[in-house]
Image (spheres, rainbow, N blue to C red):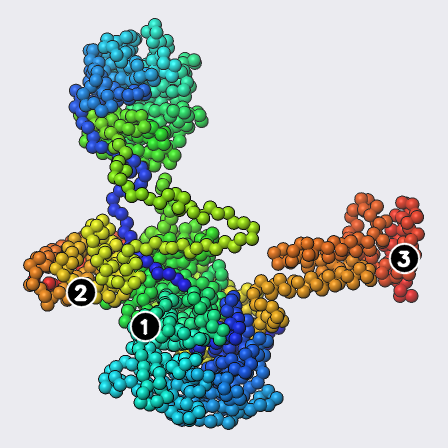
Amino acid sequence: MAGYKPVAIQTYPILGEKITQDTQYWNNYKTPVQIKEFGAVSKVDFSPQPPYNYAVTASSRIHIYGRYSQEPIKTFSRFKDTAYCATFRQDGRLLVAGSEDGRVQLFDISGRAPLRQFEGHTKAVHTVDFTADKYHVVSGADDYTVKLWDIPNSKEVLTFKEHSDYVRCGCASKLNPDLFVTGSYDHTVKMFDARTNQSVISVEHGQPVESVLLFPSGGLLVSAGGRYVKVWDVLKGGQLLVSLKNHHKTVTCLCLGSSGQRLLSGSLDRKVKVYSTTSYKVVHSFDYAASILSLALAHEDETIVVGMTNGILSVKHRKSEAKKDSLPRRRRPAYRTFIKGKNYMKQRDDILINRPSKKHLELYDRDLKNFRISKALDRVLEPSCTIQTPEVTVSIIKELNRRGVLANALAGRDEKEISRVLNFLIRNLSQPRFAPVLINAAEIIIDIYLPVIGQSPVVDKKFLVLQGLVEKEIDYQRELLETLGMMDMLFATMTRKESTSILQHTSDGFPEKKKMES
Amino acid sequence: MVEEEGVRVVRCGGSELNFRRAVFSADSKYIFCVSGDFVKVYSTATEECVHILQGHRNLVTGIQLNPSNHLQLYSCSFDGTIKLWDYVDGILIKTFIVGHKLHALFAIARAEDSVFVTINKEKPDVFQLVSVKLPKSSSQEIEAKELSFVLDYINQSPKCIAFGHEGEYVAVVRDFYLSVYFFKKKKTSRFTLSSSRNKKRAKNNFTCVACHPKEDCIATGHKDGKIRLWRNFDDDKKYTYTCLHWHHDMVMDLAFSVTGTSLLSGGRESVLVEWRDAAEKNKEFLPRLGATIEHISVSPAGDLFCTSHSDNKIIVIHRNLEASAVIQGLVKDSNIFTGLMIDPRTKALVLNGKPGHLQFYSLQSDKQLYNLDIVQQEYINDYSLIQIELTKAAFGCYGNWLATVEQRQEKKTELEMQMKLWMYNKKTQGFVLNTKVNMPHEDHITALCFCNAEKSENPTLVTTSKDGHFKVWILTDDSDIYKKAVGWTCDFVGSYHKYQATNCCFSEDGSLLAVSFEEIVTIWDSETWELKCTFCQRAGKIRHLCFGRLTCSKYLLGATENGILCCWNLLSCALEWSAKLNVRVMEPDPNSENIAAVSRSSVGSDLFVFKPSEPRPLCIQKNISREEVQWGVFVPRDVPESFTSEAYQWLNRSQFYFLTKSQSLLTFSTKSPEEKLTPTSKQLLAEESLPNTPFYFILGKHRQQQHEKLNAALENELVQLPLTENIPAISELLHTPAHVLPSASFLCSMFVNSLLLSKESKSAEETPNDVDMEEEKESDDSDEENDFTEKVQDTDNTDLGEDIIHQLSKSEEKELRKFRKVDYSWITAL
């Protein structure tokens, strides 16, 4: 025979942001630490080696911050003009930076004075990077050239003059020492090979390119410029894979999540968006106070550092794993208790008889199953239930009403219990999704407790609050109806082609307007 | 060829199983229950209907095992006869003609040659219990006119009569008193409850009675839910009673177990209560039996109980209160809101079933296939409650989708409504809830229909409502990177001058949607949802709306409340024809252009079948039912019939079923459904000695065949029959499914033997042919076989020749083969 059917709890669509694994992951950061820099933060770069310090380029200084320090642990300030693009070498011991005067400087992390200076660019160098073999530096400058430098003898190895506008971004392949990519304001992204003296791939982005990024595998190339982020398949000779337009201002920076599954883009519209690299859909987005210029993620996504135009550096650290196990937990039965007999293999002549699985019932369902209606109502009126899951309480009230026993369940309550019910009504009566059920319950309560009104000041006060609430709601509904009427008039005056009206009015009105006894 | 005149309205299964108490056979293997004019015999183990005992001409009102021979069964009927059956073979043994309308039947071991029946005397509400002497005679039909009066003024229901203590007394209850008649003393004692005398409104009417099998104890059930146990009732003064109270509503039936140690009771609560030792505290319950318990009966062996329920169901229950089998007929308990539908997959009839359920009822086997729980809520059986009702349902996309609407309205303003969309899951072979829409409209939904066009890429559903809107719902892909999800969302909301939308219908190709708004029909383009045109005849609100099909797809039909049937031409946008017809049901045939309309007149319902292209009906069937026909549906036939007469050609490919107001399911047929059922029951008769499981039938039959084959094979061995004789047997063996065959070891020897035989016979004659096979590939086998038969025809000629051939060379052989192909048949003609 059919068993007891548990009460169906009405589910309501969750408004606002959907909770997904990604939102949980990306929201699991502490409140950001704000560090004031001297100018707009144009570049943030994490050291690839522990302890994962990061270099922040702002104005004419480069600050190195430790993971949790709010003060720079080191500062490089010997720039005559604005410094650009301080980048760590793969081993984390050297740092290279370009500058407004066209010089590229190489620093030792422990030293203060530059180890090398590469001179050759005639204009500001906005992008520098180490190649995969660690002994060369690539730089791109506003003189439209891209140069490859040799570190040991600080000489220029190659010069590429293929761009026809400022070269503002670039990155070197992590795998091949001879490959690197640059993006320019001439709307192109070019991939150069140091062995051929010329670009091997050139793709048209369509907007001035602000940032480029190569996937660790080297197979995919991401370029950002204008409002677009475009992904190119390098192995197919630079075929456009996908074009993303999720920002409404220029995208300025790109960054890959540690797992390689997520791509982050920062924009002047003050948002950082997180994309899945499989579907290229936005899975999460962060808001910041000012336009974003630079963005970096630490090893294992432990820290998100965002540099903004107003010189503020926002540093967010991941929350440490919640220590839930600190409380001494009740000893649970051992694992073998649960699998006891479950792993028995059926022999040849055995007949397997499964024990019917026991259906788990909620406590209120157990009460309802045994027709303990008042107790079931008491259970769902517990504060823990009414606050966290009011829909459960409402569903039980609805079920009691369906069974025709709501009046019985509400009757015979003392001051404390009735005030609990009234509290719940006051909190939820005005919510449209609960209103039809709760208005009915409120009417029943008023009918039942009318004779004893005036005996308890606490309950009387609650009734007054409820009355005020209902009056406010009635006023509100009236106003809404007036607005609807006005809108109808406006629509009626509009000339319309179609004779049919497809405008739909949804008014969750309170059909019953119950005045209360005070 | 079917006889043309034979088409008539026949009742189509679904008769009540719960009319009277079911009766167990002595060995508890079978259970008998009355079902309309028949008695049905079910197996308690398999729930399968084993026999249908037919012969009564009116409602069967009582059945009882013959106390002197437990392989026989008595039955009585409104047709005034008592029949004695051999239920094992399903044979009618004797018919006793009593002459009165018989309302109940009792047979007791003490009175061997007589049975007790309840008959009606003069006044409609006065019944008598009389004993009928059954004369001994060898003839089939015997008149039994020897009635002796026992008790007067009794209740019609057999629940109110009980024979106690091996037939020493009979206890009868009616209204407020219990009368006990002692056969030995020929004396009646009458007891009344004191409270009923004092208080006028006390609800302690007697409802049922049961007698203890061993002791002098009578249990009575009352309307207020109490059970009273009476003792010492042979003394008018010193009688006592104790009271048991658990039921909160009327006690519907009582039964003592065979030993009398426990008492079973049941009622509206749908809980079977077992009272042990007649004590209030020793109760056992079997709850949630689904519907009101109408009857309880106990098997003579004492191992099984059974309860009959108001939803046309019999539950067989073990002694330890575990339900073991459910025999479910067509549920007719509730109002039919959904109408009749056909599930495109199972071809089952679908309609409202148990409260909140949709039942799938197989028309072929007169059996409920399954129940689909739509409301999914605990059902509280109480008169005063307003239950959630399943009001609308529709199948779409070849049975892949099912839409249902359920609603509950307590007060005018408080309407609760839910629309649910169910998807058919191939893996679980059932419907799974996909989307739940709370309050899809602000008022009652009047109609819903799916777009069933073949090429429609996206499933579409339209709902119309009294709130003046119709909504178009489409299936949308809701999946993101985390999960795959499809759900239904509202795509379009349309209205027409705030009129109530009453009906909707898609054209056959799905390009047009017709929605009726009270008196006006609007046509919408299903691509753009633009209003294309409107039709208005000012002839009352549109009650039915449907498009023509196939060649008549340019016509739209509408039937109004004022009794006008209109047909519009969609190409010219004009009224094609109209007719005055008070249409109650209008159903298009899915297999043809035909449309059936059932009209209601003062005398009865008439059926008209017509094509939309011409106003003249193909067929008029007057007076198909005296009652109002509520719903109808065309059911496609598996095997097309071939009626030649023009009037019945519309029945060739589909069958028309309809449901009347009293919820009897009727159809048109040349033969009664019982006749159709007989072949299967005849087959069952053959295997009387076997336990009646379907598996056993198949296996047993094949065993017999195997035995026959084996015998045949043995004979073959002896007489050396040619191979051709053996072929059908082997082919049958090869064509029967493997899972029904006996074990391979059992078959092997026989099979190999038969093969060996054939090889021997072949090798004797065909070896010379084999040599030439490669050269004469093209000479077909049939040719050779022809040769063979020819040879047989004139054996004396060729047998001799064959012997010689063996010694001949290859070239000569070829020559001879050519010779053989020459027709020698002329020889015989000589």
Rendering coords of residue A365 (x, y %):
29, 58
The residue identified by callout 2 is A411
Residue ID at (90%, 45%): B811
Marker count (numbered) = 3
Q: Residue at x 37, y 53 (%)?
A: B434
Q: Are marks 2 and 3 on the same chain?
A: no
Verify CB contact (< 8 Å) between mark 2 and mark 1: no
Is there any visible trace of residue A37 in the rendered image? Answer: yes
Q: Quadrant of the N terminus of chain B?
A: bottom right
Residue at which label 3 appears: B798
Give the structural element (helix, strand or loop) at label 1: loop
Q: Which residue type does callout 2 highlight?
A: Ala
- Relative placement, left or right, of A60 versus B302 is left
Q: Give the amino acid type for the residue marked by disc 1 in the picture.
A: Glu
Q: Amino acid at mark 3?
A: Thr
Q: Separation of disc 2 and disc 1 at Cα?
A: 30 Å
Q: In the image as oriented, which residue stretches furthest toward the top?
A: A153
Q: Residue at x 23, y 10 (%)?
A: A112
Residue under circle 1?
B280
B498 or B336: nearer the viewer: B336
Left or right placement of residue B335 versus residue B33 in this view: left
Mark 3 and mark 1 lie on one chain; the one further toward the N terminus is 1
Q: Chain of mark 1?
A: B
The chain to which mark 3 is attached is B
